[in-house]
Image: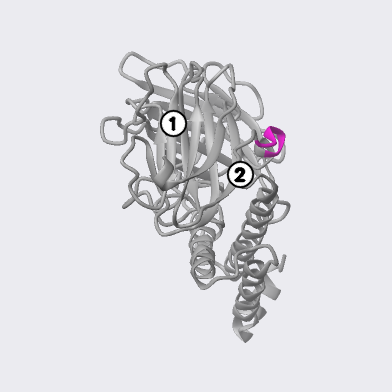
Amino acid sequence: MADNNSAEEKLLDGSAWDEFCDALKQAGRVLQSEKAPQDAFNRAEGYRYLTRLLRGGLESYLEFSDPLFPQLRCGAHETIKLGADNPDNRYESAPVRSQYDYRITGKRNTVSYLGISTTINKYGSGGTMEVTGHLDHRDLDIAEDGTFEINISREQKPGNWLPLAEESNSVLVRQTFQDRIGEQAADLKIERIGAADDRPEPLNPEKLHRGLVGATMWVHGAAQMFENWAESFLPTMNQLPPADQDYCQSIGGDPNIFYFHSAWQLADDEVLVIEAPDIPECETWNFQLDNWWMESLDYRHHTIHVNKHTAHYEPDGGVRVVVSHTDPGVPNWIETAGHNMGTMCWRWIGAQRHPLVTTRVMKLADL
């Protein structure tokens, strides 16, 4: 990484911006992988995906990058998506460093699931996100009025404590809703202990250069990682086997979640039927449909996922989900939203058992 003098030189002669643009051009080559879809529709979604990663990267590495003054920001939502982002989730993160102590204060409210982790986020450099500490709402000591406080530090603290490892660099929050309309998100704030009378330093050339480099590394690293993962699903096309749980955890998966991942592809007259005859006791579960780039499909305007609360159940307690291009006239219809292929994910959240699900491709007329 450039020191402040060389960063200033790169800024003044324009090479910092040139390197930024060249790195983005390099990231675009990820979309040209031999096994990635080659049609214009999926390629267009791929380039939009890179712009979304860039927006998220610039926010993370430039605008909200200071571990001395961390802020929880929502980095994956309706228009920034990656890694089979869960439509039932609100994701938030903040930068931290292990030489400091932090505090999260909040109010629990009514969201179904609240999980908070410290991580070593290396999406831009190594393609991993190791969880170094984790708490969820079941672990928290919460006051009668719903408020709570969490200490985040290397050394253990009394009460609610979230450990930092030496290399921890991020706090990740997942709030999982079963009913977006009826549940209220937890109110959360993070602060560095001792920061009350301090102020952030103004931008300097080195900070700008570091932010631009970090953002492009994020775009390239995340795009390559999830492209590789999508390609690994091709041997199980239209099946939904358990994912490699160790790998899921290594890239930031919630320790309370058991994941199923794969790819799907349907002709215009075909449907994919997914059956879960055995629903375990759990916090919640869900299924979602994603595009090739592992972005959840547009859940603002289409029904592309189902969960424990929204599902229709069979008389025996099981669930049948039907993925179809057009309305098949049956419950639990998942819309393909103009896609004929992509990836998909099933989650058991907070379950002690992880029953398998079955899949079969049928003609729409035979459903």
Q: Does residue 133 lie above or below 295 as drawn? A: above
The N terminus, quarter of image: bottom right
Residue at position x 42%, y 18% in the image: 317
Q: Dot 1 lies on which element? A: strand
In this rendering, the answer to whether 281 lies above or below 31 is above
* Image spot of residue 135 (x, y percent): 54, 25
Magenta residue span = 243-247
Let me know if residue 108 appears in the view: yes
Mark-to-mark CA distance, 2 and 1: 18 Å
The mark total stands at 2
Q: How is the image coloured?
A: one colour
Judge whether 93 appears above or below 226 on screen: above
Identify the mark nearer the N-term, 2 or 1. 2
- The residue indicated by pointer 2 is 262
Camera-nearest residue between 134 and 50: 50
Identify which amino acid the numbered label 2 is placed on.
Ser
